[in-house]
Amino acid sequence: MHTLVWFRSDLRVADNPALHHSCQRGNVTACYIHAPERWKSIGYSRSKKDFIVGSLLVLENTLAQLRIPLHVIEVRNDLEIPRTLVQLALSHHCQNIAFNQRILIEDRLQDELIERTAKSSGIDTTPYHAATLVPPGQINNSSGDFYKVFTPYFHKWSHYVQNNDVQTLAVPQSQNTTHISTKWINRSDLQIENSKTLWSPGEFAAIKQLTNFCSNNDKYASERDIPSLSATSLLSAHLSIGTISARQCLKYASESSSPMDSWIRQLAWRDFYTHLMLENPYLCRGLPFRSDSDRIPWRHDKEQFNRWCDGQTGFPFVDAGMRQLNTTGYMHNRLRMITAQFLAKNLLIDWRMGERYFISSLVDGDIPNNNGGWQWSASTGTDSVPYFRVMNPLLQSKRFDPNAEFIHRFIPELRDEAPTNIHHGNLTNSKYPKPMVDLRKSRHRVLTVFKKLRQ
Ligand SMILES: Cc1cc2nc3c(=O)[nH]c(=O)nc-3n(C[C@H](O)[C@H](O)[C@H](O)COP(=O)(O)OP(=O)(O)OC[C@H]3O[C@@H](n4cnc5c(N)ncnc54)[C@H](O)[C@@H]3O)c2cc1C
């Protein structure tokens, strides 16, 4: 059998179910379809686009070594994808189109359309699961419903992982094809704009990073909240486009001699938010998990929002986080929580504005994780931070950046400022902005709003 394997958010040859199983059944032709309007409607950042294109170039090389031809095709929008896939399959005499499923509702609807379009041309489709560590539908409570709270979900998740041998799939054997021309139809939009991308693309870079992280990771649990240290894996960009799979992460972590439980728990959070969005597709359409929170009079103050985006709030830890995001395309998890809470709680600005800004700036922008993180921070989600918990950015910097190393790194105006001044808000530098809100008053405002709602 000859199969057309469609690459999507799975830009790797190792542990790739669609590729692995198709190669076992016969010959394979591969394709990637670029729909610029999709990228535009999601609002992906330039750094993420560069990361995808860079990873695609690595994939092209790797597939060529396996003698698998890759066709990179550009279409205007998602609607053109089913017809394009079927035409490509027909022109290469493929009897089957195989792909790994994505989880957004739009993707699921598209999969159904592809199946119908292919069937009418006598072609079968084979969807595979690869997006999460545990397949969707496996972790339910005793009534058969999806867990709404992480801790019981995590207990079941851990049980599943321990009792089901979560295997990774091998890289397929090289094909016996003589002709392996790779075709990029219209490379125009698929250019790496920023050649000095900070993130090394492709699956080999991902494996190297994972190997280094797992072999030198005694302090993850104690240091993962300190943004000035490089204690976390920095694998989120790779996980978001599938240059590495969550199963590969678990495998390497399980074989490591370092204590990895705390890190594996983060992989479970990733599964939780992905499964949650699959169960509640409205979440990716801008709706809160807790519908009552839509009655909150969220503010849309453009001037204040821009100050937050630019890292000019006058609160050093918040500004350092935003400037890290703006200059590197990445933000440490602790800062994501602090900056998100500052926007949604202290400024009472619609969390969806922040959610969109993150996606448009992050190299690891991932719809379920980002939505989960924002709804957690704004107390609109399931299993969120309680509404009365509002992180104080001054206390947070004192605790998680005591020597102000992270703040000094990202805010040059404050390089000569003593840490105690920074943590007490006694800044002497007149070039740095004054605090844009009073922390006590803004906390009181948001608590009043939430109390009224939850009465
Ligand atoms: C407001 C907000 C927005 C966020 N937006 C994103 C996003 O767009 N993309 C994204 O991948 N993560 C997002 N996160 C989660 C988390 O901040 C990042 O996954 C993490 O900082 C990535 O760094 P790392 O790879 O070094 O993580 P590590 O600590 O090494 O964790 C390993 C992996 O576990 C997953 N993970 C870790 N923490 C979380 C979490 N809290 N929720 C879900 N998965 C997690 C990620 O895939 C990560 O790569 C967001 C969190 C918040 C609070």
Image (cartoon, rainbow, N blue to C red):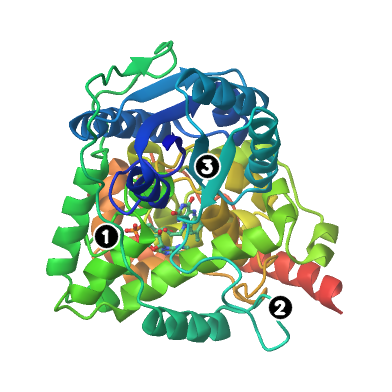
Which amino acid lies under the numbered mark 1 shown in the image of this protein? Ser
Q: Measured from the top left, where is residue 373 in percent x and y?
A: 55, 60
Disc sitting over residue 233 in the figure: 1
Observer-side mark, 2 or 3, equals: 2
Mark 1 residue crowding within 10 angstroms, few (<14) / some (14–19) / many (20+) = some
| Distance from mark 1 CB to nearest ligand 1 atom below 8 Å | yes
Q: Residue at x 84, y 71 (%)?
A: 453
Which is nearer the eye, 379 or 81?
Answer: 81
Left of 412 or right of it: where is 309? right
Q: CA distance from mark 1 to mark 3?
A: 20 Å
Observer-side mark, 1 or 2, equals: 2
Residue denoted by label 3: 359
- Residue 330 in sight in this render: no
Q: Residue at x 54, y 84 (%)?
A: 151
Question: Marks 1 and 2: CB-CB under 8 Å?
Answer: no
- Residue 288 in sight in this render: yes
Q: Earlier in the sequence, mark 1 or mark 2?
A: 2
Q: Measured from the top left, where is residue 454 in percent x and y?
A: 82, 76
Which amino acid lies under the numbered mark 3 shown in the image of this protein? Ile
SS of the residue at dot 2?
loop
Q: Residue at x 25, y 44 (%)?
A: 203
| Distance from mark 3 CB to nearest ligand 1 atom below 8 Å | yes
**Which quarter of the rendering shows the C terminus?**
bottom right
Q: Measured from the top left, where is residue 413 in percent x and y?
A: 31, 42
Residue denoted by label 2: 145
Image: 442 above or below 114: below
> What is the quadrant of residue 205 in the picture?
top left
Mark 2 residue crowding within 10 angstroms, few (<14) / some (14–19) / many (20+) = few
SS of the residue at dot 3?
helix
